[in-house]
Image (spheres, helix red, strand yellow):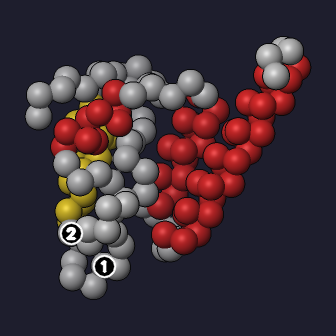
Amino acid sequence: MSEKLLPCPFCGDSDVNIGTTAFDKNHEAWFPDGTRIRKAYFVCCSKCTGASSGFIGDQTEELAAKKWNTRATDPVKDKLYTALVLVRHHLPITSKILKFIMDAMNEATSAYENEKKQQEGKI
């Protein structure tokens, strides 16, 4: 991997690492391009356990690093997203439920941003 990992966007700690998750042959999940998931990459903070890469991880270390280093503009959305990722690791939630939660969160964020722009007179 050539991209240097930035410090954690949640706690600021620089002890962040790329990890992997391996799935057995019975795991039925696919990356967006249709490839069945057998191994996925993610970035995680050792201090606060903030993590990247959504609910399934990324196909390559490079993609995981790129996503980690891309900072969102909405800290509330970031924290909610991290909370959902942490929940995923501890509860048997299906990918359909997680997709529903993420879609709802994205819709709420868009609605909030549009309302904010209207109040500022930008729309």
Q: Name the residue carrying label 2.
A: 38
Name above or below for residue 109 compared with residue 100. Answer: above
Q: Amino acid at mark 2?
A: Arg
Residue located at (21% from left, 82% from top) = 25
Residue at x 35%, y 33% (from the top left corner):
68
- Give the number of marks: 2
Q: Which numbered circle lies on residue 27?
A: 1
Q: Nearer the viewer, residue 105 or 32?
A: 32
Residue 19 pos. (x, y %): 22, 47
Check disc 1 and report its element: helix, strand or loop. Answer: loop
Q: Tell me which amino acid carries mark 1.
A: His
- Figure quadrant of the N terminus: top left
Q: Note whether residue 31 is visible.
A: yes
Label 2 sits on a secondary structure element that is loop
- Badge 2 or badge 1: first in the primary sequence: 1
Please tell me which residue lies in front, 96 or 92: 96
Label pair 2/1, CB-CB below 8 angstroms: yes
